[in-house]
Every structure is written in structure tokens, then in C-alpha cells.
Image (spheres, helix red, strand yellow):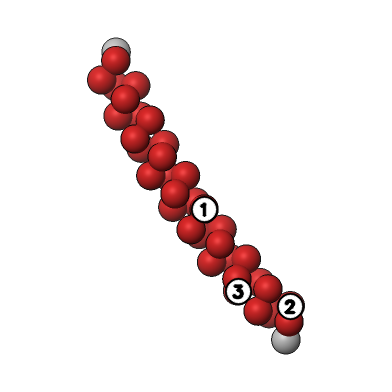
Amino acid sequence: MTKQIGFLFGSRFLILLKHKLTKYLNKYDIQLTKES
């Protein structure tokens, strides 16, 4: 039971992290394309 909760929380955290990372990378890509 605890493992299941940990897995659910872990996957939610990973999704959130991935989302933030993608957002940051998109911002960075926009800056790079503006410079070039």
C-alpha cells in the first residue's frame, strides 16, 4: 500500500518536473532563436 502511494506521488512529481523542464527549455529555445 505504501509503495503504491509512493509510486503515485513519484510519478506525479516526475510529470510535474518534466513539465517545468519542458517549459524552461522552450523559453531557452526562444531566447536562442532570437539571438541567432
In the rendered view, does 22 fall on the left or right side of 32? right
Residue, far top: 36
Residue 20 lies, with reference to residue 5, above or below; the image says above
Determine the residue positioned at 52% across, 53% down. 17
* Disc marking residue 8: 3
Query: What's the residue type where badge 2 is placed?
Result: Lys
Q: Which residue is mark 2?
A: 3
Q: Which residue is mark 1?
A: 17
How many neighbours does mark 1 have within 10 angstroms: few (below 14), some (14-19), or many (20 or more)? few
How many neighbours does mark 2 have within 10 angstroms: few (below 14), some (14-19), or many (20 or more)? few
Residue 3 position within the rendered picture, expressed as x and y whole percent measured from the top left: 74, 78
Could you say which quadrant of the image residue 27 lies in?
top left
How many neighbours does mark 3 have within 10 angstroms: few (below 14), some (14-19), or many (20 or more)? few
Mark-to-mark CA distance, 2 and 1: 20 Å
The answer to whether the residues at label 3 and label 1 have Cβ atoms under 8 Å apart is no
Q: Earlier in the sequence, mark 2 or mark 3?
A: 2
Determine the residue positioned at 42% across, 44% down. 22
Quadrant housing the N terminus: bottom right
Instruction: Identify the secondary structure beneath mark 2.
Output: helix
